[in-house]
Amino acid sequence: MSSQRPHRRGTRTVEESTPTEDRATPALAVEGLSKQFGSGVEAVTAVDDVSFRIEQGTVVGLLGPNGAGKTTTIKSVLGLVLPDSGRIRVQGIDMADQPRKAYRHVDAMLEGARNDYWRLTVRENLRYFSTIKGVKPDAVADRHERLLAKLGLLEKADEPVRSLSRGMKQKVSLASVLASESDLVFLDEPTLGLDVESSLTLRRELRRIVDERALTAVVSSHDMDVIEDVCDRVIIMNEGEIIADDSVSAVLDQFTASGFSVTSPDITDSLLSTIRERFEVVEVTSVERGRRVEVTTDSDGFYRLLALCRDHDVTLAGVGTVEPDLEDVFIEITGQGS
């Protein structure tokens, strides 16, 4: 955990719909979803009675450590895994009863940019995926051009996807999903392989399209900055169950009591040892102005820390609070790193 790591706490909230509202039907409703692999003593329960709703026009982050059940949940919704029990509805349509009708509303970007045709050009991919969704590509050509421009793909638009770099292929995968006009999309690791600038561009464009088209998106990512930047809400899974489900800001607010930091060139090894004896030290960082020490404590403890520094003739170059980001919360809730 570091006070220097930039992050933006979510400000958008998910409002509960009422039955009388036009958008009362959730984009996705999952009820009692369960899936077990294997049998007998070797049986593994991947998803255990999972239920959730995702409202129209929102972006939900689906998080969990490896083996938490999130991939099985996504694949069950996409029809790639047959669940043992449960009900899945897309735009109010039961997937078991009317799969073809339900899947007209859904698209997905799978990890590793595997949803494109690499022999086709970038522009041909966008036209193809629009066509199979029943949209005439000529009617949305201008929208495709804007999307290519926003994602930095215009110069490569007439090149085969197979000739592009990994990062470019990742952008094409996202563009193909967003070009399909589906109103519920699943994005698995959408920023994988992208540099920082491209990742920021992708986040901005995704949020713009969501707001412009009332698109509903489910994002699964190990990049917590992506989740904080684009998601309204976060669902955290562990051991096949949902262990947290709330707006990003509400989840962060549950972990506000973090701690404080002091920075000084006068923090010696001896003083650091004393601080460790009296406080829970989270991190010690070498900086240009000496050392920055972060501790977990309350305000009274902070004053004791300042008094300790004063007693050791420490000249402070900086003090600050340490607020949790989503990665800190994730580790705290699941007990595992991302």
Image: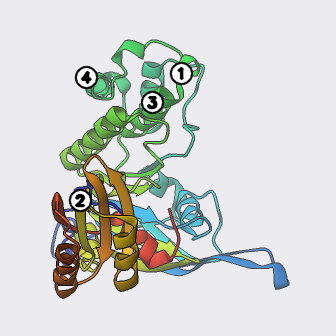
Sequence order check: which comes first, mark 4 or mark 2? 4
Element under disc 4? helix
Q: Could you tell which of marks 4 and 3 lies nearer the N-terminus?
A: 4
Query: Nearer the N terminus, badge 3 or badge 1?
Result: 1
Of tags 4 and 2, the one toward the viewer is 2
Instruction: Give the residue at x 22% y 85%.
Output: 301
In the image, taking residue 105 as reference, residue 114 lies left or right, namely right
Gap between marks 2 and 3, in whole Å? 48 Å
- Kind of residue sitting beneath label 2: Ser
Q: Position of residue 324 (x, y in %)?
A: 29, 69
> Disc 4 to disc 3, how far (Cα)?
17 Å
Which is more toward the observer, 112 or 210? 112
* Relative vertical location of residue 277 with respect to residue 121 in this rendering, above or below: below
Q: Which mark is residue 142?
A: 4
Q: Which residue is mark 1?
A: 161
Answer with the quarter of the image where residue 33 lies.
Answer: bottom right
Q: Quadrant of residue 174?
A: top left
Q: Which three-letter amino acid code belongs to the residue tagged 3?
A: Val
**Tag 2 residue:** 264
Which of the two discs, 2 and 1, labels the residue nearer the N terminus?
1
Q: Which residue is mark 3?
A: 172
For disc 3, the neighbor class at 10 Å (few under 14, some 14 to 19, many from 20) is many
Label 1 near label 3: C-beta < 8 Å?
yes
Element type where label 3 sits in the image = helix
- Identity of the amino acid at label 1? Val
Work out how far the residue at label 4 is from the one at label 2, CA to CA, in angstroms: 56 Å
